[in-house]
Image (cartoon, helix red, strand yellow):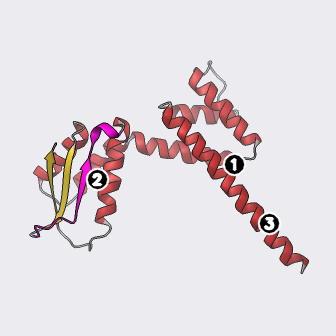
Amino acid sequence: MFELFFTKSSEGVEEKENLEDKRMFDELADYVVSRNITSAEIQEAYFRLCGVVDSEEPTAVVRQLQEKMRLMTEQRFPLNRFTKLIETTDLVENGDKDFYRFVDGLNITIEEKDVLKSIVFRMRSGELVILTEGNHEPITELVINATDIPQHFFGFMLSRKIKEVLTRLPHEAKIEFSFKEK
């Protein structure tokens, strides 16, 4: 009986800690995004927090971020969770390059690839229509408003949206893209 009570109790504590971790992580992510902090700056703050880097004086941004991280670890935030933020920020920063590689790997015409790449390269707004070959009914229409998306997120966000649509299709489906600029 005691063992069952202890198990239930520790599960509740664990769940509460996970919610607190998530809240702190989300706050840190918002802080990073709102200040356009790069993955390199996050990594430097993390290394400094771990005592790995102590050469040269850090920038004000790195110093402030390191202090924020230090306060979080004092509240039992797991040190290794900062690496997830570094990795995610790096993914977003490299979103355009990854988008271009993704587009190159699609089985579509060169013209369609050029159009897709130009959407990101030129930050074009409009309507991207995805349909299956020979079918005139669109699978989806993505309305893209380039002014609503920060430039460094554009390729990342567009590739996520397209991949989301493609996962709903049969693997052998041949797709086509068209774009109307607005």
Foreground label between 3 and 2: 3
Q: Nearer the viewer, mark 2 or mark 1?
A: 1
Report x, y in % for residue 145.
27, 43
Do tag 3 and tag 1 residues touch (Cβ < 8 Å)? no
Amino acid under disc 1: Pro
Q: Mark number for residue 10?
A: 3
- Whole-angstrom CA distance, mark 3 to mark 2, is 44 Å
- Nearer to me, 172 or 124: 124
Residue 52 x, y percent position in the rendering: 67, 33
Label 2 element class: helix
Crowding at mark 3 (Cα within 10 Å: few <14, some 14-19, many 20+)? few
Q: Residue furthest top?
A: 57
Of the image marks 3 and 2, the number of the one nearer the N terminus: 3
Residue 88's spot in the image, x, y percent? 49, 46
Q: Which residue is mark 1?
A: 78
Relative to 175, is 46 above or below?
A: above
Report the front residue among 144 and 160: 144
Q: Which region of the structure is painted magenta?
A: 135-149
Residue pictured at 89% horizontal, 81% vertical: 1
CA gap between label 3 and label 1 equals: 18 Å
Q: Secondary structure at mark 1?
A: loop
Q: Is residue 21 left or right of residue 153?
A: right
Task: Give me the residue at 62% from left, 18% from top.
Answer: 57
Q: Which of marks 1 and 3 precedes in the sequence?
A: 3
Q: Inspect this view and state whether residue 178 appears.
A: yes
- Residue at 69 percent across and 48 percent down: it is 78
Q: Which residue is mark 2?
A: 102
Q: Is residue 28 above or below residue 15?
A: above
Amino acid found under the numbered disc labelled 3 = Ser
